[in-house]
């Protein structure tokens, strides 16, 4: 345990409950259960008779659901936050599991509402959706209806759910078991060491080139040893996905993801094509980085090598100051909301034994303010983490004027405020940094972060597309998958980076391909959206802030496309996405000028 500048910075959860043994927790759960039973008793028969169903009844049902979900959110968040802050306490583990279990029981009682709503015939549903009393719930109810053509009969859905446990989900578990048990033998500092997957990957950020090269070679040798199993798992899941697409009437493998993201395929295609057309920007950067490292050409294992000099320790109170100043320079309201998080102890920042690693922002419901957890270790990366989570916090605070069903955003726009917050703080810090070597480190770190999100995730999505179309023809071998992977990557790296032969195994450990197919383009969408918005902010100046604020206030009350329109954003327009690359080019040019 380290003592650092964030020691003693803990969150205050008293707004939720007084302690893990607060009798109000069980009271909440019991009350929710009773309400859910009454809800089912009253609304199941009404929903099953759509001819006589009135908009007022649907409104009443939605208001009751909101009340129950909000109360459940309070209990669930409290138990989850308590546990995250101290995972070692058995009483917190017990509480978390008890609340989780009870919530599932209660949610199961409420589930019929959505299912019955999907069963209602289109003309009846349209009649209800057109009623002004349901105006605030139109987006939620309408979004649900989009799944109607893809939902099977209840008995079939139940069989799929049960069989998935020994089918699709079992292959997912096999993947997790194989990859988490991977160990790699590597010589480091003259000693033979045994490393796991994340440990060996982190060596790619080391300054010792020989070590980076050995780490990458060892990684691929190890993966090749499990190649047969990893190939079989992925191949099976590809076929399972294709089968389900046929049964559920999805036109192409990405269609279900687009539906969940509330985005249409044409916009995603435009986005991905624009990214691909800008691969040369990445290649220019790789040549620049080779120069920085004094190499004739970059090798794959040099991609994340450190350059420049990291800035000095960054105490927590300075981070707070910098973030609030940067937010305030954008808009006074940003500073005001951000300051509340610090002043009212909604952030748990100190590093403690038993506390969960990483960082998150929990925004339970419009009735409650968000909470932030991070592990602040006095370095620049952590300043960015706080800026990121506080961005989420701003979004969660501003959208509290929405109702429960309009509160959350889909994946594609969920990271808008967080990444935008990071950009504000990054620029603020870069402008105040006078030492060139520190500026180089800052810029290179930012550029590589952005590339990993925009370019690399685009490459991953292209690979998935290739794998799916190849699987439609025949079963895939390790060799075939390796070739597709190299093909998708070679377009990105071009002749700017040396690719080792072992890299053909690079696809085999990526969990998204297994657990959440076509997830990766959402990262591209989110990051590029922010870069383009940030560019607009720089072009338009102060007049941009109110529009952006309104976007955050809107929460998830409509599709991303509709919510972005007032900002002048057309997600189907290649020129909009190109703005993001103009911002990126600016960063690379700034770095070039320093070298
Ligand atoms: Zn985030």
Image: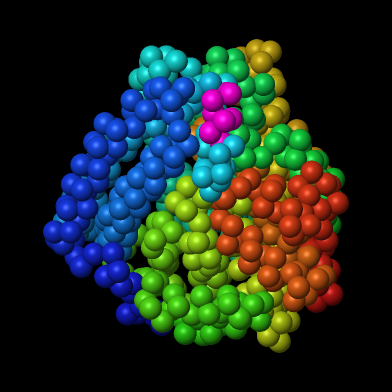
Q: What residue sits 22% from the left and 53% below the top?
A: 28
Residue 239, position in %: x, y?
56, 18
Picture coordinates of residue 580, whole percent (x, y) = 77, 58
123 in magenta: yes
Q: Report whether residue 482 is seen.
A: no
- The way the protein has been coloured in the rendering is rainbow
Toward which corner of the image does residue 146 lie, by quadrant?
A: top right
| Looking at the image, residue 138 lies above or below residue 368 | above
Give the quadrant of residue 552: bottom right
For the C terminus, the image quarter is bottom right
Q: Is residue 55 magenta?
A: no
Judging depth in this view, the residue of 406 and 84 nearest the camera is 406
Name the magenta segment's main secondary structure: helix
Left or right relative to 491: residue 330: left
Residue 18 in view (yes/no)? yes
The location of residue 345, given as percent across then percent down, is 37, 76
Relative to 14, say whether 361 is above or below. Answer: above
The magenta stretch spans which residues? Answer: 122-129
236 in relation to 1, above or below: above
Quarter occupied by residue 238: top right
Which quarter of the image is occupied by the N terminus? bottom left
Residue appearing at x 38%, y 40% in the figure: 61
User: Between 561 and 67, which is closer to the camera in this rendering?
Assistant: 67
> What is the number of callouts on the image?
0
Q: Position of residue 19 (x, y in %)?
A: 19, 65
Residue at 63% across / 45% down in the picture? 559
């Amino acid at each position: 345990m380290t003592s650092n500048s964030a020691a003693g910075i803990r969150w205050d959860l008293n707004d939720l409950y007084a302690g893990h043994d607060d009798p109000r927790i069980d009271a909440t759960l019991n009350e929710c259960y009773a309400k859910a039973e009454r809800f089912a008793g009253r609304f199941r028969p009404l929903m099953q008779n759509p001819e006589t169903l009135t908009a007022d009844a649907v409104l009443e049902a939605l208001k009751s659901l909101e009340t129950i979900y909000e109360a459940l959110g309070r209990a669930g968040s409290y138990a989850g936050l308590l546990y995250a802050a101290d995972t070692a306490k058995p009483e917190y583990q017990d509480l978390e599991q008890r609340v989780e279990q009870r919530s599932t029981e209660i949610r199961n009682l409420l589930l019929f509402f959505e299912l019955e709503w999907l069963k209602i015939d289109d003309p009846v549903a349209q009649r209800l959706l057109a009623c002004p009393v349901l105006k605030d719930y139109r987006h939620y109810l309408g979004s649900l209806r989009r799944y109607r053509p893809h939902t099977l009969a209840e008995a079939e859905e139940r069989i799929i759910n049960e069989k998935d446990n020994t089918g699709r989900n079992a292959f997912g578990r096999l993947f997790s078991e194989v990859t988490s048990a991977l160990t790699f033998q590597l010589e480091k500092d003259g000693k033979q060491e045994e490393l796991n997957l994340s440990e060996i990957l982190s060596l790619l950020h080391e300054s010792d080139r020989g070590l980076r090269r050995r780490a990458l070679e060892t990684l691929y040798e190890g993966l090749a040893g499990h190649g047969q199993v990893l190939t079989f798992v992925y191949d099976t899941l590809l076929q399972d996905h294709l089968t389900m697409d046929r049964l559920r009437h999805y036109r192409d493998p990405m269609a279900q993801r687009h539906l969940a993201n509330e985005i249409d395929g044409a916009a995603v295609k435009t986005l991905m094509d624009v990214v691909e057309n800008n691969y040369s920007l990445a290649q220019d950067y790789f040549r620049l980085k080779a120069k920085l490292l004094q190499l004739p050409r970059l090798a794959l294992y040099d991609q994340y090598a450190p350059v420049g000099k990291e800035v000095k320790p960054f105490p927590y109170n300075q981070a707070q100051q910098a973030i609030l100043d940067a937010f305030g320079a954008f808009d006074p309201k940003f500073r005001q909301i951000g300051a509340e998080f610090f002043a009212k102890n909604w952030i748990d920042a100190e590093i403690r034994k038993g506390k969960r690693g990483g960082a998150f922002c929990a925004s339970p419901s419009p009735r409650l303010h968000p909470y932030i957890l991070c592990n602040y270790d006095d370095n620049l990366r952590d300043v960015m983490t706080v800026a990121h989570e506080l961005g989420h916090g701003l979004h969660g605070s501003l959208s509290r004027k929405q109702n429960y069903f309009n509160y959350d955003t889909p994946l594609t726009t969920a990271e808008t405020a967080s990444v935008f917050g990071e950009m504000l703080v990054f620029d603020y810090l870069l402008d105040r940094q006078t030492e060139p070597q520190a500026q180089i480190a800052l810029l290179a770190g930012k550029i590589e972060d952005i590339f990993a999100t925009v370019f690399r995730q685009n490459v991953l999505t292209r690979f998935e597309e290739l794998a799916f179309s190849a699987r439609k023809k025949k079963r895939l071998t390790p060799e075939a998958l390796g070739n597709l992977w190299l093909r998708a990557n070679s377009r990105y790296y071009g002749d700017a980076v040396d690719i080792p032969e072992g890299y053909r195994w690079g696809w085999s450990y990526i969990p998204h391909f297994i657990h959440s197919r076509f997830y990766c383009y959402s990262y591209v969408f989110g990051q590029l959206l922010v870069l383009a918005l940030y560019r607009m902010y720089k072009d338009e100046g102060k007049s941009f802030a109110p529009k952006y604020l309104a976007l955050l206030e809107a929460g998830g009350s409509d599709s991303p496309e509709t919510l972005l329109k007032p900002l002048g954003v057309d997600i189907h327009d290649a020129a909009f996405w190109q703005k993001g690359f103009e911002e990126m080019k600016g960063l690379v040019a700034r770095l070039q000028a320093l070298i």
